[in-house]
Image (cartoon, helix red, strand yellow):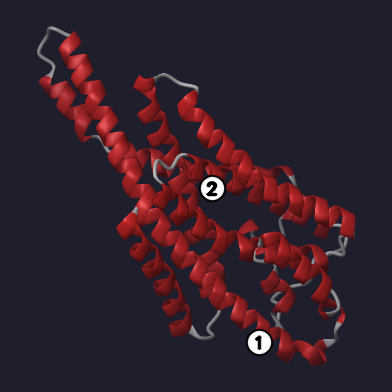
Amino acid sequence: MGCCLWLFSHRCLSPLCQLDCNSCFLLGRHRRVLSLLSCTSAGIFLGAGFMHMTAEALEGIESEIQKLVIQNSTNSEGNSDDADSAYMEYPYGELIISLGFFFVFLLESLALQCCPGAAGRSKVQEQEWGMANVLEPHSHGPLPSPSRGPLRALVLLLSLSFHSVFEGLAVGLQPTVAATVQLCLAILAHKGLVVFGVGLRLVQVGTGSRWAMLSILSLALMSPVGLALGLAVPQGISEGGQGLAQAVLEGMAAGTFLYVTFLEILPRELAGPEAPLAKWGCVAAGFAFMAFIALWA
């Protein structure tokens, strides 16, 4: 789906990028529609992160910690009730989810630090939704130079590839068909718009067709790679550590989902003053959709 949207953006929207300012009203209409779709995908990710992934990770981590505490208490002869109680009360699940959040944040910060040319008027989060820069009639700040544009697109692709691996990893870790379908719907809704935005960004910076297609295909393969890793993790470890490893990785992936929602999609889309109630409605609709699916998860 994402690749099809990219082909549409590359073939049909390339001429739009060459239009003069007299066509800005048409581009503004497209931008508003895509902004509402982006808010809907943010609500879907928010629902998937809170209603499913975070809850499953917290439950799994708490269960595994209880097993470890019980095992240690049976093996030790001394009075360790106070220590066991302290271990039980510590919020391990919240810590792991936060570590996943900050780990993605760190990688993107390192990418920007190592590639100073990729830093400009906007962050990586704004670059992910590059269609806003292409379609927005009144852009704040100068357009990126031709030499820095491809570098920004490369940093964007690397960042999105990391997200795709973790999202595919989350799908591979799901124990039931309903949970897998829930996450697949969230990823499909989000990645379709993301790849569409990447296609617009590549068109804007004048990327060649071969390089653009290679970049999109590489990005499309990242989710299957993560899915394969998620399927391989439970099979490659012992039964005793299987639940803990799955809960920890799912918590890390939940942190990634929250990062995508709160630092990549919502800040960019809610920054504009146009149609705030419509944006709220789209976010709420996406969340309600995932909450409804969670009845069967």
Q: Is residue 12 left or right of residue 71?
A: right
Determine the CA span between mark 1 and mark 2: 31 Å
Horizontal and vertical percent for residue 56?
33, 44
Residue at the image position 69 percent from the left and 66 percent from the top: 196
Q: Residue furthest top?
A: 77
State the SS at label 2: helix
Mark number displayed over residue 38: none
Task: Answer with the quarter of the image where residue 77 lies.
Answer: top left
Q: Is residue 72 above or below residue 134?
A: above
Horizontal and vertical percent for residue 118?
74, 54
In the picture of the structure, the residue carrying the numbered disc 2 is: 167
State the SS at label 1: helix
Q: Amino acid at mark 1?
A: Arg
Out of 121 and 289, give the one closest to the viewer: 289
Horizontal and vertical percent for residue 42?
49, 65
Residue at the image position 34 percent from the left and 58 percent from the top: 294
Q: Quadrant of the N terminus?
A: bottom right
* Disc 1 + disc 2, Cβ < 8 Å: no
Residue 21 appears in the picture as rendered? yes
Q: Residue furthest front?
A: 177
Q: Amino acid at mark 2?
A: Glu
Residue at the image position 69 percent from the left and 71 percent from the top: 131
Task: Answer with the quarter of the image where residue 68 lies.
Answer: top left
In the picture of the structure, the residue carrying the numbered disc 1 is: 29
Horizontal and vertical percent for residue 60?
31, 37
Query: Total of numbered circles in the picture?
Result: 2
Residue 109 appears in the picture as rendered? no
